[in-house]
Image (cartoon, grey):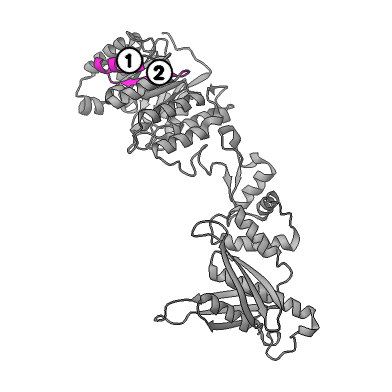
Amino acid sequence: MDTQTMSDQVKIFDTTLRDGEQSPGISLDEGEKVEIAEQLARLGVDIIEAGFPVASQGDFEAVHAIANAISGPTICGLSRTAHKDIDRCWEAIEPAEKRRIHTFIATSPTHMKHKLRMTPEQVKEEARSAVRHARSYTEDVEFSPEDASRSDFDFMCEVLQIAVEEGATTLNIPDTVGYGVPEDYAAKIRSIRERVSGDYVISTHCHNDLGLAVANSLAGVMAGARQVECAVNGIGERAGNAALEEIAMAVKTRSDYFEGLDVNINTKELQRTSKLVSRLTGYPVQYNKAVVGRNAFAHEAGIHQHGVLRERTTYEIMDPDAVGQGESQIVLGKHSGRYAFADRLRQLGYDIKGDALNASFTRFKELADRKVQLSDADLEAIVADEVGTSGENVFALEFLECHGGSIASGTPHATVVVSKDGEQKMIRCEGDGMVDAACSAIKEATCVEGKLTDYTVTSVTGGVDALADVALQFTSEEGIKVGGRGLSTDVVEASARAFLNAVNKVSIIRSDSPQVATEDRPGHLSAELR
């Protein structure tokens, strides 16, 4: 018995434009298909399955356009076993410099009985006739026994042997409905190599109904398959196909396991290819998608961030630049640690340490509990807010609760708790609005009278969770003029913080200037805080 020649090269057969386009809701026009095919050529795929020419006039024209425009990869068209289908397929791919006809027929009892309504002998003859006819056009013919995983194995091997004898050079073993599991699928591949004689390449085509498409494909490779059929972003019928980017990076990253096998893929083009396919198909890439997802190289947990900043390989088995993702992303959120926070500040030009860093980090953690992800602009605002007042806080805002409403629902009011030297005081005041009520309560709690002369609110970033940056001017009753600034995702809280910031400055000036000191005034907070 002859055996197929084993190679160290695993061919990548991309079916994004055929099986991928069969995903519900995807309909690519000719221009879009050509654009994707051009990118697939840059990516370095070996075979592009450009479409199913007999399916429609539009599909025929798109495959024909790809055959005319693309050089490098083999251009393949899919065809059923009917001769008219094969004729149409050949007509579509004929302009290509390298051409392949891929013909198929189902071999599982379920498909033969309910879909084909053919006997096993009729299926054998269909396979024989189809491969022979395809071979009259080209020497590169691929044959697939559809629903291989649920086929009677002995019968399927008979059909495969017929296909090889009629000239098929690639035998594709489709797990059409994602029924296979790695060990069983690999065993089938090994047995086919032992039982079907001739010179051919075994291919895998695995669907993801059980989430095993990539695992099954790689198990097939280890068992001797030297072609993998896959799609960009794993798109395809139902749960999709094996993801091209995952197949390629698994082989390259675990070269120790895959015994020196390789794929002819320019991995730096993976991210660009993924984005192009996502944009043109309208299918978004899940955030945690392996290799090309936006979180594939992103780290928010403090321990992970610390490790990656010290040595990338502590938490990354692939270089993000190797797949076109650029650099690792340190995402600052509520799980982030001080090390990553300080590192990002240094990148922004803020080399702060000690109490200033501690104050900024504490404020960062408070805001991160309210806002999922803080931007660089948010961090700069935090530093400006905290560092600008570091060491000058006589009073601290411990609690703020506000209620607004129309005339019918009652007067707006606010309750604040302000502390000084560990002692706290609670005050409730009404006002023209929640901001006015909060500022009035702070004035009463701190015994610092005066009036607001300027008040400005700006948004640090966009979105409903943007930080509000409040800047104001305050003049005390004795004429001390100061500015205040506050930051929060809540405008009222930002205003209260800005107002208290100004009050703190007045208190510092008073303590430094005996002529305006109010320490002994009746009712001063130092005597009233409890």
The spot of residue 524 in percent (x, y) is 69, 87
Q: Do the residues labelled 2 and 1 touch (CB within 8 Å)?
A: no
At label 1, which amino acid type do we have? Answer: Trp
Label placed on residue 202: none
Check disc 2 and give the amino acid type: Asn
Q: Is the residue 316 above or below the residue 347 in the image?
A: above
Circle 2 Cα neighbour tier, 10 Å, few/some/many (<14 / 14–19 / ≥20): some
User: Is residue 52 something one can see in this rendering?
Assistant: no
Q: Is residue 327 or residue 310 the one in the foreground?
A: 327
Magenta-colored span: 71-93
Residue drawn where x is 77% and y is 80% of the image? 511
Q: In this view, does 128 lie to the left or right of 468?
A: left
Q: Residue at x 70, y 62 (%)?
A: 358
Q: Name the residue under label 2.
A: 68
Magenta-span inclusion, residue 389: no
Work out whether residue 492 or residue 186 is closer to the camera in this orientation and state it.
Answer: 492
Q: Residue pushed farthest bottom?
A: 522
* Residue 149, percent from left and from top: 34, 27
Residue 404: x and y, percent?
47, 76
Secondary structure at badge 1 equals helix
Residue 90 image label: 1
Give the answer, above or below, for where 134 lies relative to 183: above
